[in-house]
Amino acid sequence: MPPFLFWLFASLMLVFGAAVVLNRNPVASALSLVVSFLGLAALFMSLDAYFVGIIQVLVYAGAVMVLFLFIIMLLNLRAEEGRRINWLAATGGIVVALILVIQIFSVIGHFQAARQTFPSLERSTTDDVWNIGALLFSNYNLPFQIVGVLVLVATIGVVLLSKREPR
Amino acid sequence: MDPFFIITSLLKIVGILFVVILPMVSYAVYAERKVSAAIQDRLGPNRVGPAGLFQPIADMFKLLLKEDFTPRNVNTFYYWLAPCLAVMPAIITIAVVPFGSTLFGVPMVIADVNVGILFVFAIASLGVYGIVIGGWASNSKYPFLGGIRSSSQMLSYELSLGLAVIPVFLLVGNLRLTSVVRYQIEHGWFIAPFVGDWMNPWKWVLAVPMIISFLVFMIAIFAETNRLPFDLPEAEQELAGGYNTEYSSMKFALFFLGEYAAMITGSAVIVTLFFGGWHFPGIPDGSRGWIFGVINIAVFFAKVAIMIFIFMWVRWTLPRFRYDQLMRLGWLFFFEIALVNIFVAAWILAYFPSS
Amino acid sequence: MSYLELLKLASTEAVVVVTALVVLAIGLTTRREATGVTVATAQGDQNVGGSSSARTNAICSFIAALGLAIAIGTALMLPRKATLFSGMLVITPLTSLFKIICMALAFFAVLLTKSEKSLRHPGEYLAILLLATVGLMLLVSSEELLMIFIGLELLGLSLYVMVAFDKTDVRSAEAGLKYFLFGSTSSAFTLFGISLIYGMSGITSLAAISEKLATVSVQPLLAVGIVMTLIGFAFKIAAAPFHLWAPDAYQGAPIPSAAFIASGSKVASFVVLGKIVLVGFAPLHGDAAWHAMVAGWSPVLAALAALSILVGNFVALAQSNLRRLLAYSAVAHAGYTLIGLVAGDREGFSAALFYTTTYAITLVGAFGVVALVRRETAGDDFSNFSGLISRSPMLAGCMSIFMLSLAGIPPLAGFFGKFYLFSVALRADAGHGLLWLVAVALFGSLISLYYYLIVLKVIFVDEPSLAIASSPDHLSPDLLQRIAVAVLAAVVLFLGLMPDALAAGLLAAMP
């Protein structure tokens, strides 16, 4: 993929990721998140990870976020009132964020491996879908099945906690 | 990237979009009116041109020239965004569907990606945003209800949609849609075991899960495209048109376009998955001469047209489901059927001698 | 590797999962009946629904207990040593031992559930409890970061639900929300840390990570990864700056949930934390000795330990609710236990594990007493315990054993645990570098003596308050739970008298 596409999608992701936080309207936030996910999916595909990329769209952008929207609409959440900015808190936040940025830069600056150019990835001779499938049914079979148990717990929990009980 | 690839891809995109899909959409509307007329023993459109054939063109002008009215309380940005989102996914999906064999050695599919069917599902699942946002941005009761119904309906049927096709891909062993077509050319159509080596009993046994797959998939497509008997998001009698109530002129037309484009895409996917795509017994593929390549494309779209006719036939004969019936059907019936069907298909593949 | 072999080695987990599904199915079907009955009588007769729920509870707990017993049996039959998928499932004497301990703790939690009459959906509750146990067992028996994370999530999700389970109680909901928010944030940190470590080493198996890390120096990025990974575990064991959920969870959650969080979750977390730092990060040990700190994970853990001991003990002084007091003392005990890991090597690890195991047993027993008292007096403040001796001498005796063991009075298990820990920490290096940590811990123990004795004073000396005195003079005869509490007290006493029974086993099982 040409580098400018990488920058395009990466900046798309970041801009809309920021929009998720900055938007006052919950529906707009959710939609921004969808765009951010689409950018992420494009980045995955640029690494030849078509399966992961398309699953990102199918599951997150297509299903999870639709549910989010559904809930937001059903609860009829209105846009937040414009709050007055507490300048003291805002300055504090900015200072902390700046310190964090400086830290991140210094950490990355000390990261030796980041200075060398990595060799480009080898293209796999087999299909990535096939590879993922084979791994899930061999080496990663146990975690795969345990994730099934995990989802079961989540399902039971959600049903139980959200169900309305007769008094 | 080599220029030949770029030019042929552009040609394919432009050709399929402007020469085939868009005219097909407008004439699908015309066909819908004619079919409904025939079913209800009426005449249908017959004033503009011979047998009303120019009716779609007249409709287009009418919609373009109407006042584009924006209600006062709408959320303007999203109100404009929604119709665009409604059309896009259906058209993008066509990119991975092989609509012909080869023409002058160029494969007749815009992008033969290795995650073909997943791409179809992923992009089609984005189609719901147009409707949901349209319903929400209109800031009005009926569109809002339509949007909410649409989102829950699409989510419920996406599961059966995805599960229903798994038997097909268990057999093909690959997610590419071109591989599905190639498999069907070699072994006969999934839905019709009598095509190809019909003596093989294995194929007849396997046809059982395939037919179940086909039925579940087709019904789920009905729900995904919001067609009757599952057109609750726009149910005229209850919601006065649902999510598009507040829209007028070209924006309304775009919703309309989106619905028909989705129907055409859905039919194209069904044809590819179960009816052998562009293959017809006895007709060679495009490597034997460009004329056969053209015939292959024609065969594909003829099959799509037949599927569209079935869509319309169903629409004008079946009554609408109630909302709770729709949900119960999706979650408690089709979902389970599709699951069991996968096991049946896998069992046959594993234990039934293949010939 | 065949699936059959996988099934054989994971048979313990499989048995527990199947039991959970069976319990879930039973709960689902009988629940239907019960609601059918209440609807039929137009909700006029509450007793019908109530008794049917109690019957469901009894059946489900019986099956859950039976399943756990079978699972313990299969755990005993596991091979001595086996490794699957480069460490995703490791079987050693140590993991088998802790699987059994986790299941035994879950067993007592099931017994607590059985006598929890007001519980609304016993089938679902027990199923989630069992699935949480599966999470514990996976944590204990895995030496691979991916699997450890999935285990953590399985455990975490189950516990969130278990804490918020009592929908009639606002405090349960509050506790659930707090636990969920803290928990999900901390597991995000852990995941990020794990991904950094994976990025540095290119592998997720602990042994392989340690080989890779042996060749690199402590880079800032690696340090970030390690600290982030530790945060998630600090949350699970409720170490000091990450303990804020604990008081609410211990107080608001249904009692079996609180007991399970305090016991099983803690034991498994310490086992896996020890494995991560001692096996995976072994080359980056660092040094926590006073004046000679060397960067690595041990100074981080030492700081956590010191802070936990001080915060836990001082805040516990101000509590007037027994469950809250137990929560803060849990923070302090997490601090003591961390000292063992800071000391490092086999001795330190086995001291930490001995301590956390005895602590878990003690706390399950204490929560058992709390449950019985709470059922009688509808509360768990100190005032509800006043004069317990006159109402039930047996419970008062058990409670005093538990409290004295927590305080570390000989001849109870807590004393030996502390003694073992501190002596290991002192011996850890020649210059007694960890003396400062031991001093802090001794100071903390001294403070803790005060509030544990306050509890005993309330039980033995205080006059029962009027409201309670007017209630029936005997606690409801729940024989099973009383026996369970008595057994736990006996175990605490036994481990105090003959600590070798467990400690020698632990040391022998150490790799």
Image (spheres, grey):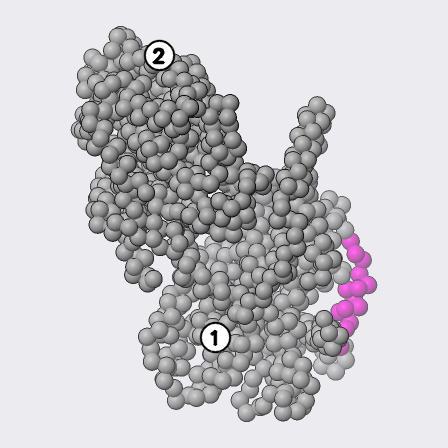
Q: Residue flagged by tag 2: what amino acid is it?
A: Tyr
Q: Which mark is residue C450?
A: 2
Q: Is residue B59 magenta?
A: yes
Relative side of C106 to B55, left or right: left
Q: Which mark is residue B172?
A: 1
The kind of secondary structure element at disc 2 is: helix
Q: CA distance from mark 1 to mark 2?
A: 73 Å
- Dot 1 surroundings within 10 Å: few (below 14), some, or many (20 or more)? some
Instruction: Name the residue located 38 percent from the left edge and 13 percent from the top edge.
Output: C447
Q: Is residue B71 above or below residue B267?
A: above
Q: Position of residue B202 (x, y in %)?
A: 37, 81
Q: Is residue C78 above or below residue C165?
A: below
Which residues, given as a range, are shown in magenta?
B54-69
Q: Is residue B118 above or below residue C407?
A: below
> Which chain hosts label 2?
C
Relative side of C51 to A55, left or right: left
The one of B211 and C462 positioned closer to us in this rendering: C462
Q: Residue furthest front?
A: C430
The kind of secondary structure element at disc 1 is: helix
Q: Which mark is residue C366?
A: none
- Residue A120 showing in the rendered view: yes
Instruction: Name the residue located 64 percent from the left edge and 83 percent from the top edge.
Output: B102
The one of C313 and B51 positioned closer to us in this rendering: C313
